[in-house]
Amino acid sequence: MEWMDRFVKLMDTISDCPPSGIGITELSKETLLSKGTLHRMLQCMLDHKIVLQSHETKKYMLGPKSMKWGSTFLQMQDPVGLLAQYCNRLGEETGLYAFICRFQGDEIFCTYTHQPSEMRNSFFVHVGQRMPLHCAAAAEIILAYQAADIIKTMIEKEKLTAYTPFTVTDETEIARRLRLARGARIASCMQELELGQSALSAPIFHQPDQTVISISVVGDHHDIEARTEDLIKALKKISAEASEHLMSMNTLSSLI
């Protein structure tokens, strides 16, 4: 339906905007919708609290209704808190920002994060964040275990943005990295999303060699580089325990 296409396009654009919001002129440019159409849509969305508008800047941002929908969806991804406990452990044991990502539909996004109390740094990753398939370790390790046709389709659809000078955008090289990640059961992102920050990720399996979930750490590049071997050991140990737990839960649920 045309109205649904417009609504989704508008919501996608607003959700990708900075915390300060986005103005009507930029919205029109990004969505290719007229200002008149946008005014009518946004007024209705304001009435339902799907979006909010700043009184000072007149810019639009996501509202409490959309936040509630998103929060409910994310809670459903780990309803018993099974994965959160492993993410918390990883963060505390390594002293790094740890996070869980999940593959659903045709997107890989962050569903949970844990920041050690003594840490003051802020990182690219936050709950609900979509992970770029070609340069985020958390996405790469999940993609590495998908069928070849799925990998091909998803990479072809991905906008291979060069976020830093270290970002790999060549499809052949991306495919090679995915094969290496699957073989090592570890993916890395060394300053590919943000200069000075790097990440390591491991899969959490729901069946042998089948995954839609990854667990990761992110931190200062030099710290990650200096501790890579120890961090990989910690990641593999905790991801293996989480995988065993998840597979046992799946086995139990199949018997009920």
Image (cartoon, rainbow, N blue to C red):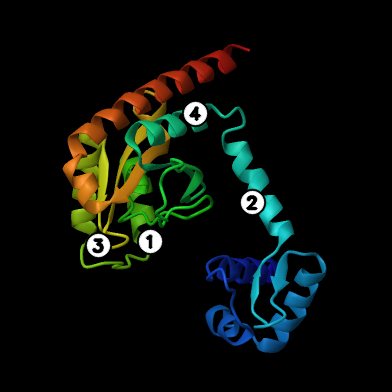
Closer to the observer: label 1 or label 3?
3
Q: Are marks 2 and 4 in contact (CB under 8 Å)?
A: no
Disc marking residue 76:
none
List the residue tagged with mark 2.
Answer: 70
Q: Which amino acid type corresponds to the residue marked 2 in the rendered image?
A: Gly
Q: Are marks 4 and 1 in contact (CB under 8 Å)?
A: no
Closer to the observer: label 2 or label 1?
2
Q: Earlier in the sequence, mark 2 or mark 1?
A: 2
Query: What residue is drawn where x is 47% and y is 23%?
Result: 246
Q: Earlier in the sequence, mark 4 or mark 3?
A: 4
Q: Earlier in the sequence, mark 2 or mark 4?
A: 2
Image x and y of residue 227, in percent: 20, 39
Looking at the rendered structure, the secondary structure element under dot 1 is loop
Disc marking residue 167:
3
Q: Earlier in the sequence, mark 4 or mark 1?
A: 4
Image x and y of residue 208, in percent: 36, 23
List the residue tagged with mark 4.
Answer: 85
Query: What residue is drawn where x is 48% and y is 16%?
Result: 248
Q: Earlier in the sequence, mark 1 or mark 3?
A: 1
Closer to the observer: label 4 or label 3?
4
Closer to the observer: label 2 or label 4?
4
Circle 4 crowding by C-alpha within 10 Å: few under 14, some 14–19, many from 20: few
**Quadrant position of residue 49:** bottom right
Q: Is residue 47 above or below residue 127?
A: below
State the separation of the CA atoms marked 1 and 3: 14 Å
List the residue tagged with mark 1.
Answer: 158
Closer to the observer: label 4 or label 1?
4
Q: Is residue 256 above or below residue 197?
A: above
Q: Are marks 4 and 3 in contact (CB under 8 Å)?
A: no
Q: Are marks 3 and 2 in contact (CB under 8 Å)?
A: no
